[in-house]
Image (cartoon, helix red, strand yellow):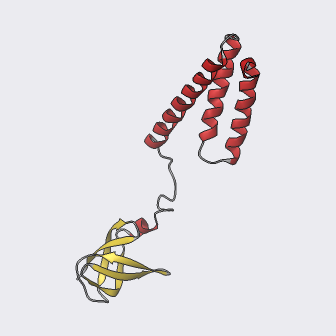
Amino acid sequence: MIESIGHWHWWILAAVLIILEVFAPGAFFLWLGLAAVTVGGVVYVLPDMIWEYQLLLFSVLSVISIVIWRKYFRSTPADTDQPHLNRRGEQYLGRTFTLEAPIIDGVGKIHVDDSTWKVHGDDCPAGTRVEVTGVDGTILKVECKQ
């Protein structure tokens, strides 16, 4: 049966992959589907192409299309009106807060909105105003203000 793969089989596979793309985020199946469409077109033009070459062409086109898409996606990030949505700490850069717990040996705590953040900075007593100058994961880097 595998020896009788025709262009319709590739186009049906492409349709299935593109439909899967609707349910799976990430645009991965889309590129596999486009590779299947291309292989279907090649098999339509060259109906005597053996199945091994068809699979090889599909594999190569899939890898190439995914690599090109990933490079393009990384080089042109999407503009957003909420650039700090999943990087909560970055929204506090430049803001000033009052130390809840003193910074001792470079580690202290501040209260921000409804949560407490661990901070790193120069040693300061509790109640000192500090400015957030950086973020390292879930730790805010602060400078003491006089």
113, above or below 64, in the image: below
Q: Position of residue 37 (x, y in %)?
A: 67, 25
Front residue of 46/78: it is 46
Work out which residue is located at the far bottom of the displayed protein and give it.
Answer: 126
Q: Position of residue 143 (x, y in %)?
A: 26, 75
Left/right placement of residue 49 relative to residue 139 reads right
Numbered circles on residues, count: 0
For the C terminus, give its image quadrant.
bottom left
Left/right placement of residue 120 relative to residue 39 reads left
| Residue under the image location 63 percent in, 29 percent down | 34
Front residue of 98/117: it is 117
Q: Position of residue 119 (x, y in %)?
A: 34, 76
| Residue under the image location 77 percent in, 22 percent down | 1
| Residue under the image location 38 percent in, 82 percent down | 110
Query: Which quadrant would residue 65 be assigned to in this image?
Result: top right
| Residue under the image location 62 percent in, 33 percent down | 32
Front residue of 35/125: it is 35
Left/right placement of residue 69 relative to residue 58 reads left
19, above or below 110, in the image: above
89, above or below 18, in the image: below
100, above or below 91, in the image: below
Q: Position of residue 15 (x, y in %)?
A: 73, 33
